[in-house]
Each structure stands twice: as C-alpha cells, then as structure tokens.
Image (cartoon, rainbow, N blue to C red):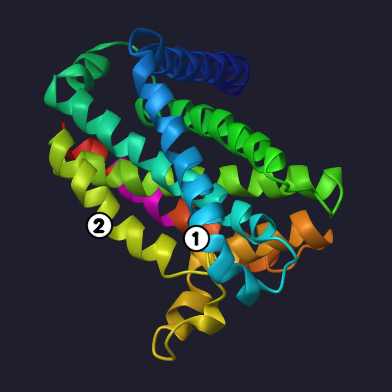
Amino acid sequence: MSTSVVERTWPERLRNNVSDVLTLVKRNLRRYERIPQLLVFSTIQPVMFLLLFNYVFGGAIGATTGTGNYIEFLLPGILMQVALFGSTATSVGLADDLSKGMVDRFRSLPIARSAVLAGRTGADLLRNTFVVLLMVAVGMVLGFRFQGGFAYGAGAMLLVLFFGYAFSWISATIGLTVHDPETVQVASFIWIFPLVFASGAFVPVATMPGWLQPFAEHQPVTVTVNAVRSMMLEGAPGDLGQALIWIAGILIVFISLAVWAYKRSA
C-alpha cells in the first residue's frame, strides 16, 4: 500500500518542483522588464567586442588564423566570451537576493529547495540564448557563414549555451559564498578573464609564448571553442568529446558545491 502512495505522489511532487523552478525563472526574467537598460547594455558590450576585434585587430591577427576571413575565427570565440561573461549574472543575482533577504523568504515558502538555484541558472540560460542568437546575427552581417551546415551550426550554439550554463554553477557557488553583490562582480571577472583571453578564443594558441601554450591548449575554453569552431566551419565534431567531459565535470563538482553553499548560507 505504501508503494502505491509513493507511485501516486512522485509525479505530483515532480510537477510541483518543475512548477516552482519555472515560477522563479519567470521572476528572475521580470527583472529585465523592470530594468530594460540592463539587457540593452549587456548586449551592447559583446557587439562592441565583436566589432572592435574584427576591425581593429583583424588585420594583424587574421593572417595567423589560417582562415580567409578573421570573422570566421573570431565569432566562435566571441560566443564563448558571451557565455562566460553572461554566467556572472548568476553570482550577482544570488548575492543580491541574499543581501536583501529574498533567499530567507524563499526558504519560508513551501517550494522546492532546488528551485532557487535552478530558477536562477535557468533564467540566465535563457538570457544567454538571446544574446548568443543576437551575436550570430551580427556576425552574419559581418560576413560569417555556417560552412559546416545548419545541423552542426545549431549543435555548436547549443554547446556554447551548455558551456555557459555549467559556468553559471561556478558563479552560483561564488555568489552564495561571497554574498556582497559588488565584491561578487569583481571576484567573478578575476577568474574569467584569464580563461577567456589565455585561450584559443581570439588568437591561435601557437602564437602564444611557449610557457603559456600548455595551459592555453588544454583549458576548457580552448577545448570547447575548438569544438564550436570545427562544427561551425568544417561540419565535424572536433574536440566535442573533450568539451563535453569538461562540461560534465564542472556540473558535477559545482552543482554539489552550490547546493552545499546554499544550505550553509541558511
């Protein structure tokens, strides 16, 4: 008899948990309705990076990439930058909720404990989706084309979003540990900048100093951007397997750490 109760209640509990997550996703996205400037400026920045790198540095760097047009090499790297920079919104949002007592209010409500973290990272995933699609559109205006075909191109964009989602959990851990929104914003970029710029996102790793190349070649940003670039331009998976291993490892470690930090902040 007890088994049948569990069988009846489990789907209902699952539906309730999903409903809680979707409610908090909607709540986090409404911030952009109230403060539309936040979304506008967060999209202007990556567009500026794309234009500046393409037109200012493209002439000097383009010859070293082995592509006919620097935008073909650049856009996958910019997409990775967008995903990583966008992941910092998770840490800032959670720290802001902690400092204002919102997390304590959520704990007092009859909602799933997982909904607070899943709702925050889910909302940031949707925001990243919008920005990635916008950057692809701008890149195509500048001359980028999916030479590997539509299926590989769509897969490459999903990989970028999946990668950014994994890093949102790193940001969540930082936000739940540091608490202060201003400090969190500084702390987030301290570790993201070396990963983005000491990688193959904007220049070939072979052009870097010898002592830096081993780190740049094997770190997760380079591995993933190589897979994205290969899928978009060649229609081949490239380093996709290694990229998925990095993403899975980050999710396993930092979801656990974020949950631990959330419980610890009670």
Q: In terms of secondary structure, what is the magenta stretch mainly?
A: helix
Q: Which residues are magenta?
A: 253-259
Helix, strand or loop at label 1? It is: helix
Above or below for 121 versus 149 = above
- The residue wearing badge 1 is 249
Tell me, yes or no, if residue 121 can be seen here: no
Q: Is residue 13 left or right of residue 63?
A: left
Residue 188 in the image: above or below residue 205 = above
| Residue type (three-letter) at the residue carrying disc 1 | Gly
Query: Which percent across, then down, holds residue 115?
Result: 40, 24
Work out whether residue 77 or residue 83 is closer to the camera in this orientation and state it: 77
Instruction: Name which residue type carries label 2.
Output: Ile
In the image, residue 173 lies at what x, y percent? 29, 46
Quarter of the rendering containing residue 200: bottom right
Outermost residue, top direction?
34
Identify the residue under disc 2: 190
> Gap between marks 2 and 1, in whole Å?
21 Å
Residue sitting nearer the eye, 16 or 219: 219
Could you tell me which residue is drawn at 35 percent across and 56 percent down? 192
Q: Secondary structure at mark 2?
A: helix
